[in-house]
Structure formats: C-alpha cells, structure tokens
Amino acid sequence: MIRRTAFDLPLALFIASAVLGLWTAYDQDAAWSKFWPIVSGIAAFYAVAWMPERVEQIEPLRLIFAALPAIVGIYFLLTNDWREPHNATHWLYQQLPQIAEALPALPGYRLHANTLGGVMAVFIPLQVAGLFNDGARLRPLRVALGLVTVGFSLAMLALGRSQGAVLALALTTAGWLLHLVYARVNRRWAWPMALVTLAAPLMIGVALFGERLLEWRGDRTDVWQNSFALASDYPFTGLGLDNFVMPYSTYVVLVHVEHTYHAHNLYLDLWLNQGLPGLIAFVMMLLVAFTRRNTASQWRAAALAAVAVLALHGIVDDALYGYHGGKLAVLMFMPFGLLARPDARFADASREARGGRLRPTILVFAGAALIIGLGVLAALPATRAAFYRNRGTLAQTKAELAAYRLHREGNLQDGMRLRPEVNLQPAMDDYLAALVENPWDAGANRRLAQIELTFRQYDQAHDRLLKAYASAPYHRATRQLLGESYAMRGDVAEAARLWRTLDVSQGQLTIRVWWYALFTQQEERARWIERTIAALEP
C-alpha cells in the first residue's frame, strides 16, 4: 500500500541535492552515472517501506535481507582478482595460494575489499533479523542454515579487512547488548546509559592512544583534512556528483593526474557531491531514524543497528556512496525503508497526532526561525564572500577541467589556463567580489593567486597567498603555492620551511620545475625551485 513516510521530506531534499550535483558537475558523464544509483536507492527505500510482509507463503523482506549479504559475498569471491598486489585481499593469495588459485576470477565488475566490508557490516544485523527474528518456533534445519549463512557473511567481513567496518559493527553490537542489560533496570534510560557506558572507554582510549591512531592511518587523516579544505571552496553547492578526483588533484594536492577518488568519509563525500543540502538531508534521515517510534517492531532493532553501522563507519570510510562512483548507493537507503514501515499498534495514535493543532504551530515557528536565521547569515560579509567564492570555484572548475578532459595528454593544468577557449574571467570576477566582502577570504585569495602564478603576476599572487595562509594555514595547496612563491623570490629558507610540512612524494615540486623550465622557459625560476628542493634533503 502506498503511503507517506516520515522520511519523505529529507528524501525529497536529498534527490533535489542530487539534481544540484548534476548541475554543478564539470564531468556530466560521471555525474549521471552516480545520479541513477541514487534514484534507484530511493526507489529501493520505498519498495522496502511499502512491501507487504507476506505474499501467500513467502515473506519477501526476510528473503531479501537474509540473502543479500550472501549474494554480495559470493559475487565478490567469483570476480575478485586475488593476484593484484594492491588489492587488500592479496594476503589470501600470499598465505593460501591454493585457495586463491581455485577461485575462478570471472569477468565482471570488481568490488573493492572495503566495499565488501562495508556492505557486510551494514547488512549482517538485517540478515540476522531475517533469519532468526520470527515469532514462530525455529526448526533445527533453519537454525543450522541461518548459522552457516551468517557465518559466511562474517567471514566475508573479515576477508575485506576493513577495520572501520568491523569496529562500527562491534560498537553497535556492544551498544545493543548494553541496552538489553540496562533495559532490565530502567527501560526509559537504557539507551542513554548504554551510550555513556560505551563512550567513556572510547574517550579514554582516544585520549591515550589518539595520536598513535592518527599516525597509524596518517594517509587517511590527510585525505580527510584535504577533502574538508576542498569542500570549503564549494561550501554551499559542492563540486558535483562523482567529480571529486581531478578537483582534488588540481586544487589541493597539485598534481596533474588522478590521485584520490573520494574523501573516505561519508559526510564529506555528501557535502562535496551534493552540497550542504545533501549533507543536511542525510543528517535529517539519521535524526528521523533514531527518534521515530512507530516503526515495525520486528525490524526496528536490526534496522537501527544497520543505520548505526552506516553512520559510524561513514566517519572513517564511505563504502556505499564513495567507492565505485557511488554505484552501491542503491543499497544505502534500504535500512531506512525498514524504519519507515509503520507498526499497527501506533496507527491510531498517528492519525490522532495528524489531527492536532500543535504540530503545524511548531512547523510555522520553526520555519520562521529558519528564515530569520538564514537572513542574518546572508547579511554577514563572510557569508556573501563565501557565496561569491563558491560561484567562482564552480566557474573555474568547469572552465579548466572540462578543457583538461579534452586536451589532457602532455599538458599541465597551468597550460589549460592559457588556452584561448578557457575563459577564467567570470571566476576571477567572483573571487574579486568575494574579496570586496572579505579581503581575507582564504579560498578566493588562494584560487586567484593560483591563476596569477600561471599568468606571471607573481607579486600580486604572493600578496594574496600571504593573506590566504594567514586565514587558513592548514590548507595544503596554500602552503605549497606560497612556498613556490618564496622560492622564486630567492627566499629558500622560508620556502623550505613551508614545504617540509607537506607530503610531496607525488612529484609535485618536480612538476613545478618542469613548468618553469620546459613549458615557459623561465629557467631562473626553475633553478630557485631546484635549490629549495635540494635544501629539503637531510
């Protein structure tokens, strides 16, 4: 039966933000390839929300969620390339080559091992509910089959070697068990007590070992910091669906090839792909999920666990929305669909609530407060500067990277800026408008300086980079560009100081030597950069 759900508003905002992501994208082919899985995922949400519990003798929801993790696991086993050295599952080929050789490696779309781990972690709670959460007495054969199926899914979770997925599932399971214990004492306060009990040792652990954890996955923390810096350049709209890779390379890491394919953080990826509206829509979905009560009781606990795993794992990785161009986003909405299924026990209460006067009054006041708040924000010079910066970065990205896709071979991004068909004037006008509102706007200063370095306006670029560095010293590109500016002014010591804070292992500095020596014949500037590179050596 078709009916409204509590998730309709955030889902409408989510699909609207996906349309925004289509409009902002410079690479339309990539954007459309991610848009359709999002649409399919929302369709899957409503299919799960409206699906009848039983069709004759078949319970379709139980069948779907009991089988889904096993199907994904079998598909991975049949298509994975175990011999690929960079594959996270290469360890199986090294340790047990006989097993790896016996697996067929069929042609087909290959899932990343982290995606496998993320899918398993999210859907194992739903699989357990589908197999065992039945009011009727379970037959021994069904129990045995269920244990084998869940055991296979757990083995696939371990095979993926995604520590974040395992940790998210473990924390969710621990929280659920603590809730069961505390519910015997006080049902009302069971969840708060469970969360406090779980949070206390985690906070102590982070305080004691947080620095070691960051060092252990320093590459991941660099990606998060750089992705946040990139998102800050497109704060309202994001940069477009599945358009992360080359803007990240061009405006943050400063290399001329693809470097990183997504932010490895669900929330940053949503912000970058669909802007603030997409991020707000997903947070709204989480709030509805964890506060709504009139949910089908037999699925509520498992669906909440799945959403909790998705939310927790999303802090450290992005298995469903980020990998493979977001093609598995179709699965991301299914746990929410279970939470949208109403419980008959709450039907009358829901109808009565819709007939009351309080809810419209609250909505009116909330809407008025939101409008006033947005008006106050819009009146701030920093907000207006951010708007112009956002518009400028979109114009620059579309102008430069659309051309770079067509004329990429043998060129650097600087070369693209010099092509006559690349019109950067609209972007530069927006950056200048942003600086009228806020002369210290880090993004506008840095982006203008990057363009000015290409067009040999070195003194102007240096002044802008000094302001950008003063406002946002954490931004990787600002430090590299300012170091380059210092080097070309002969200040090797200051340039080396800035560059020592960077990972330049991808040849970023050598690229700059090439640009000045080979592409623009400014050999003196190239020699100063080479001297600074030599000063970096211990």
Image: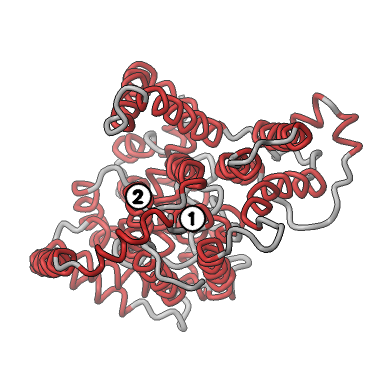
Above or below 64: residue 241? below
Q: Nearer the viewer, residue 5 or 467?
A: 5
Query: Residue at label 1?
Result: 249
Q: Nearer the viewer, residue 537 or 440?
A: 440
Is residue 142 visible in the rendered image? The answer is: yes
Query: Residue at label 2?
Result: 293
Mark closer to the observer (2, 1): 2
Above or below 362: residue 126? above
Q: Position of residue 318 (x, y in %)?
A: 51, 48
Three-letter amino acid code of the residue under disc 1: Ser
Is residue 453 visible in the rendered image? The answer is: no
Which colour assignment does the render follow?
A: secondary structure
Q: Position of residue 192 (x, y in %)?
A: 29, 31
Q: Position of residue 25 (x, y in %)?
A: 46, 72
- The residues tagged by marks 2 and 1 sit, at their Cα atoms, a distance apart of 45 Å
Q: Residue at x 36, y 64 (%)?
A: 10
Q: Classify residue 445 as left or right of residue 222.
A: left
Q: Which of the 4 quarters of the picture holds residue 176? A: top left
**Residue most toward the top?**
208
Q: Nearer the viewer, residue 221 or 433?
A: 221
Q: Residue at x 55, y 52 (%)?
A: 320
Q: Position of residue 259 (x, y in %)?
A: 55, 51
Mark carried by residue 331: none
Q: Residue at x 35, y 16 (%)?
A: 208
Q: Classify residue 59 as left or right of residue 485.
A: right
N-term mark: 2 or 1: 1
Q: Secondary structure at mark 2?
A: loop
Number of residues whose C-alpha sits closer than 10 Å to that of mark 2, classed few (under 14), some (14–19) or many (20 or more): some
Three-letter amino acid code of the residue under disc 2: Arg
